[in-house]
Image (cartoon, grey):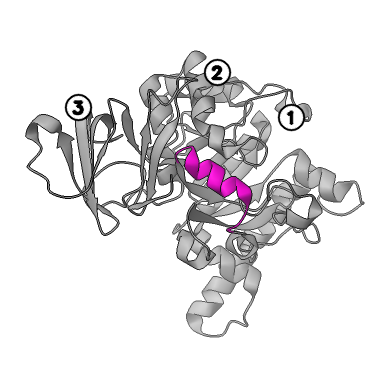
Amino acid sequence: MRIQNGILLTMEGGRFENGYVEFENGKITAFGDMTDAPVYSGEVLDAAGGYILPGLIDAHTHIGIGEEGLRWEGIDYNEITDPVTPQLRAMDGFNPFDTAIEKAAAGGVTTAGVSPGSANVIGGQIAAIKLRGKDVDDMVLKAPAAMKFALGENPKNCYGNHDKAPKTRMMSAALMREALIKAQRYMEKKEKGDAEYDAKSEALIPVLKREIPVHVHAHRADDMLTAIRIAKEFDLRFCIVHATRSAKIADVLAGYDFIPIVGPSEGPASKPETVDGSFATAGILRVHGMTPAITTDHDVQPLWLLPMYAAMCVREGLSEEDALKAITIVPARALGVEDRVGSIAVGKDADIAVFSGHPFHYMTKATAVFIDGLRVK
């Protein structure tokens, strides 16, 4: 298959004003400028002067696990019975038939980080999932891709209001440390061959070994700094999710190596800690040298509108190039799947979106979308 005659944005290897991309057996085999394109005898899709991009990615969603149009029946992302649940796996609550999945894919979104919610201090294992298929085992790109942690109002509200821990930010941090220390000791015993199986500690071993990062839900500046403090104590890889008030401490955050996953930024604040939500945040962080990803936090905001939220960040100061990277290669890195998706490169998965015009223009539509080389729109 060849897609041709479009503005090709590879997100890592350059821009081609009249470009093409070829793929076979689900993998990208060639790309470049049409003036250099060899004679091709296979199926051809004409982009008609539109834009050709890698499939879009959101590193933090609850799609398939917080189902569209349902109430409690389809909400499976918060196990509010225990504040420390690292053994839970988002993919075990994922419904491939969530109607939001088809809408997101039709909008050009091909991969989503599917995450437990933020009710628990440690919520469970995040999965990177392709938005095509009937069986989640076939849709998973990487699982676990990260571990969900949460600080701030949500754990306090879900447990503290019922006189259970955590009732304070102090206890949230203490529970994180307690679980990580216990997992360290478990890992040491396991290496010696004398550990009795512990599902919670077992799930935290990839975190302690730096095989996967923690994605820490944090809105307030002090919560972000607590997340960094704990990450430093245990030498953890981490991302900060939401980062709502990060502009207040952008100069401090710039001293640490992490991806801020910023958003959602539309609409009125839903609680005190989100009052400073702004589409300007991503641009402010970029000015300070950080590389943000942009999130809809679906189902807080619809995943299919991901390009619109990136466009709003451009309006408020983020460069167009950085905004495009914030919904492609940067979230791929946050999920540890940049070797497979997030840019157009030979050997990567043929996850490709074709748009009628610039993806950030309000009149633009996705005209064709491919996941693993199979057309979903």
Question: Any magenta on residue 303?
Answer: no
Q: Earlier in the sequence, mark 1 or mark 3?
A: 3
Q: Is residue 364 above or below residue 139?
A: above
Asked if marks 2 and 3 touch (Cβ < 8 Å), the reply is: no
Amino acid at dot 2: Ala
Locate residue 288: give its quadrant.
top left
Mark number for residue 18? 3
Residue tagged 1: 273
In this view, the residue in front, 169 or 292, is: 292
Q: Residues within 10 Å of mark 2 (few under 14, many from 20)?
A: some
Amino acid at dot 1: Glu
Residue tagged 2: 280
- In this image, 246 relative to 326: left or right? right
Give the percent coordinates (x, y) of residue 275: 73, 23
C-alpha distance separating marks 2 and 1:
17 Å
Q: Which residue is rendered at x = 44% and y = 35% of the image?
A: 327
Foreground label between 1 and 3: 3
